[in-house]
Image (cartoon, rainbow, N blue to C red):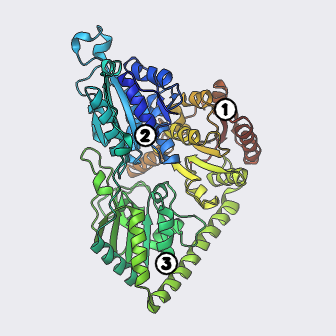
Amino acid sequence: MSLDKPEYVSDLVVYLLNRLGVEYVTLNPGATTRGMHESLVTYGGNIAPEVITCSHEEVAVAMAEGYYLATGRPQATLVHNIVGLQHASKAIYEAWLNNAPMIIIGGTGPMDATHRRPWIDWIHTAQVQAQIVRDYVKWDDQPQGALSVAESILRAYQIAMTEPRGPVYLCLDVELQESRLPDGFVIPDPSRYRPAAPPSGNSEAMADAAKALCEARWPVLLVEGLGRAPGGPAALQSLSELLGIPVIEVGSSFNLSNLHHLNVSGASADVLKDADLVLTVGVKDVEAALTRPEPEGIVPAGLPRVASGFSRRHQSVIRDGTRLVRVGLQEYGVRAWTSSHGRLTPADISILGSGPQVLRELTRLCQSAMDGDLQRRVAERAARTREIHTAIVARAQKDLKERWWAQTPIATARLAAEIWETIRDQDWVLAHGSLSGWERRLWEVSDGARFIAGGGGTGTGMGVAMGVALAFRGTGKVCISIQNDGDLLYTPGSLWTAAHHGVPMLIVMFNNRSYYQDVGHQLAITRMRQRALDNVGVGVSLEGPATDFATLAKSFAIYGEGPILNPEEIRPALERGLRVVKEKGAPALIDTITQPR
């Protein structure tokens, strides 16, 4: 849609968002963004961008994240002054951790104190409103004047989309939004303010890394987030196949098909213990990927014994002397306030560069160095890795049938298998969530466009899923959201947005009626103190009452079914929900009562 020449500063913002390709603005309305709001729905015709109404700013920001994860295009969010930004801050932090770019636009009361209404404008105006989120956005600004607003929007887009990507925050004075543009105002051309291309890596460092790869006996590729980079999975597959290198995925995003014989993510500890070289690509926290909690039996004398998996002491899964090569742009994203970068890890070779570009160059260099001895080692590695991959698949199927299939409450593995049988012949997309990794073990995940599974922090799950499903609305794709009970209880009003805007997706509740993560911690500390375990569930259980999520969904005019306790009833319920999603283009929620994990 081509917009007319803007008259007001808020019109100018809408015009620029339109030219930058922003399709949606998610918001919860408020007085300090009324100028922007009116421009979106009147000047912009609520078309380009379209307004998505949310019941909570945390949901609005999470939807922008989900839309980006699905499309690679950043969206905009409006937040009402101090209080809206406070609500949004949790989701902004999650977007920061997930390198999800978005343009967050906040309003503030008049900066000219003599123009403020008594009380309300004073409590909604801050000296530097961005101070709330400054430590976990890439950039913030509070421009003054029409041209400064235009440049701020363009710079915000540039910075948000420059690797490593992330959210940015702009604060616009309410009077500035509502002011007319000066006569003869010239709008900058957005096409001349594109983000810079990411660095491709130092040539000498890449030559050293290629040499090390060719000399290694059992190199391992440790990768994260390549599915979100154009050409990432293809570049990874080319290098891994050329050298027969086993691949281990880190994080929730897609990197390499789980059907590929070199993908051995399900046996990471066994694969890594024999490595003489580890090449990490895009891995944010290398220590977390290369260590495991110390088992109870080997905790050194004088230290407390705790439940395995909850120990603060970790041990390396690689041998002393294993070489480490790091590739990525993580160093550019390190900030002082948050320690999301993890512990400082030594590396033999570090390459600051775009993962896909570096992988492609390493493939070229290694191809030119290929000789008979290397070809022999590649063949041996590939054969060994194929055996490991085959064993992983067989073990998952064996555990599913012999251990988990008939158990009640519903086992996580059984639920994953039933969802897969329901959707396997559909054009499906996993929009959000996980079933303790069983979806990676049992589903056929061969395409990154199907396996988005983004998000993270409690309260953002439904918002992220809706953002993904919104991106695919009207395409015929079936979006699945695996939704945790505790997560949805933070933002139950998100279901209203799904219903109101007709966001079609199949919501499957992973309802263990507990904040179960904390059960492990309570068990660990109680055992350490050698006390009775009788009260471990106090303050953790979500029973008494147990939430009826199907009824909750129905209260928002969403198809709801459950709670389902019998495993045999899962598939028929999922199929009925799927028909609603496909035939009506509407959301459907199936509440399944599950085991803790």
- What crowding class fits label 2: few (fewer than 14 Cα within 10 Å), some (14-19), or many (20 or more)? some
- What crowding class fits label 3: few (fewer than 14 Cα within 10 Å), some (14-19), or many (20 or more)? some
Q: Which of disc 1 and disc 3 is earlier in sequence?
A: 3
- The residue type indicated by label 1 comes to Ala
The residue located at (33%, 36%) in the rendering is 188
Residue that extends furthest to the top in the rendered view of this protein = 118
Question: Quick one: SS at disc 1?
Answer: helix
- What crowding class fits label 1: few (fewer than 14 Cα within 10 Å), some (14-19), or many (20 or more)? many
Q: Which of disc 2 and disc 3 is earlier in sequence?
A: 2
Above or below — where is 401 with respect to 15? below
Instruction: Tell me where residue 324 sits by quadrant.
Output: bottom left
Image x and y of residue 362, in percent: 39, 74
The residue located at (58%, 51%) in the rendering is 435
Q: CA distance from mark 3 to mark 1?
A: 50 Å
Which label belongs to residue 242? 3
- The residue type indicated by label 2 comes to Leu
- Closer to the camera: disc 3 or disc 2? 2
Q: Evaluate if marks 3 and 2 touch, with contact meaning CB atoms under 8 Å apart.
A: no
Residue of label 1: 550
Q: Is residue 465 left or right of residue 166?
A: right
The residue located at (64%, 55%) in the rendering is 413
Above or below — where is 583 with respect to 261? above
Q: Evaluate if marks 1 and 2 touch, with contact meaning CB atoms under 8 Å apart.
A: no
In this view, the residue in front, 288 or 530, is 288
In this view, the residue in front, 84 or 187, is 187
Question: Quick one: SS at disc 2?
Answer: loop
Which label belongs to residue 165? none
Residue of label 2: 20
Q: Is residue 166 left or right of residue 481?
A: left
